[in-house]
Amino acid sequence: MRQRFIFSVLLILSQAIVLSAQSALLQSGPMIGYVDMKEALLWAQTKQAATVHFEYWDTEQPAKKYATDKVQTEKNTGYTAKCIADQVEPGRTYMYQLYINRKKVSLPYPTQFKTQPIWQWRTDPPAFSLATGSCAYINETPYDRPGTPYGSNYGLYTQIAAQKPDLMVWLGDNVYYREPDWATRTGMLHRYTHSRSLPEMQALLASTQHYAIWDDHDFGPNDSDGSWIHKETAWEVFKAFWGNPTFGIPGQKGCTTFFQYADMDFFLLDDRYFRTPNECETCERTMLGKSQREWFLGALAASRAPFKIVAVGAQVLSPIKTNERYSNLFEAERDSILAHIERENIKGVIFLTGDVHFTELNALKNARGNWVYDLTTSPLSSGVNPNGPKETNPLRVEGTAVARHNFSVLRFSGPRKERQLEITVYDAEGKSVWTKTIDATGEIR
């Protein structure tokens, strides 16, 4: 009996050591990327070359398990793995388990995803929520500027997870390349790895779908543009660390993508890859580039979604002519987009923007009587701009300027023909700062 007891103890200890060893190989994640009705992307990063796969199962049929293909992580892509769960059904909740080198990885938080339901011709569209924000600076002392750290309030990411959003859209400057980072693949991979490994971020990554665009700081140097010589490397690294459904419109590179969630359409635009240099006075002025702009305007006109959610790094509606706002540097292109929305009688356009390190909601009613909104959410954990709310902005909705770390949650609800959007901005402690509701007519109430 004593020998059997000793053997059991040794067996338990050996299993614990194996689990610990596999957990030690996990650098960051797991993270949920896009999730549709018949497919989901699961992501993880290891510390060295390893084999990664996931098991997953319907919470109502836990005995029946499925497995993704095994992916070998490589140094050239930062030891990241993208695994596809392709044996899922619509409208189901799945638990998932990460394996590294065919061994389970123990995690201290739940890991599950929900596939999108089939609702058309059957029911009203489902209610769902979306978290969003921009400017996520994570300190690393050897590479930061001297003085007060630029990043802080990392507990904000646990507060986002506590809201249990169905998805999150990151609005650019999701990492901040420093001088040692932006000119080499090694530097870019290091910066993404450091930021993605933040402990406070892990539960959020594992619990909701993540989609992203970039802005200057996760593309290259400050205010970088389409002339940036290392933009293709930046694109390859961006692809390695995010789980968007696509990366660029057909035939082009960049971070542009599109997806649908319930009855809403999401347009994620690239404001860097094709951008005219800010200081080039004789260049043809464009932020989006001709092909991306034409695709976007056509797709926007074709959309029948009650709300069309457009994510782009720079503020679109604000008339303030400073910094990298659309109205300051690319006013003609901005005006052509707004004119297209008016001419085509497109209703329910909501821009999601970042960059300026403070939050505000801008609103513009065009000549067709349709409201266009621009919700700027910034910053998540980088420096705050205290002067932003002091600007005289006639399009700002009263009481929506916020100059502290914050994030937004958008909640879509209501019957098919009476959908409404509730926007709530939360501070780093998870406290509500303001709430506005946009009804089916486009009016704030």
Image (spheres, rainbow, N blue to C red):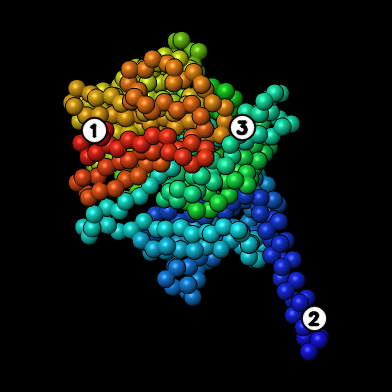
> In the displayed structure, does residue 298 sit left or right of residue 368?
right
Name which residue lies at 45% across and 28% down: 402
Q: Amino acid at mark 1?
A: Glu
Q: Amino acid at mark 3?
A: Gly
| Label 3 environment density (alpha carbons within 10 Å; few <14, some 14–19, many ≥20) | some
As drawn, the label of residue 151 is 3
As drawn, the label of residue 367 is none
Q: Residue furthest top?
A: 281
Marks 2 and 3, how far apart at CA: 50 Å
Q: Secondary structure at mark 1?
A: loop
The reply to whether callout 2 and callout 3 are in contact (CB within 8 Å) is no
| Label 1 environment density (alpha carbons within 10 Å; few <14, some 14–19, many ≥20) | some
Name which residue lies at 68% across and 58% down: 23
Q: Could you tell me residue 96's position as x and y percent?
A: 52, 62
Disc 2 marks which residue?
6
- Picture quadrant where residue 25 is located: bottom right
Disc 1 marks which residue?
443
> The C terminus is located in which quarter?
top left
Is residue 240 among the parts visible in the rendering?
A: no
Q: Is residue 121 above or below residue 16?
A: above
Q: Is residue 55 above or below residue 191?
A: below
Nearer-N-terminus badge (2/3): 2
> The N terminus is located in which quarter?
bottom right
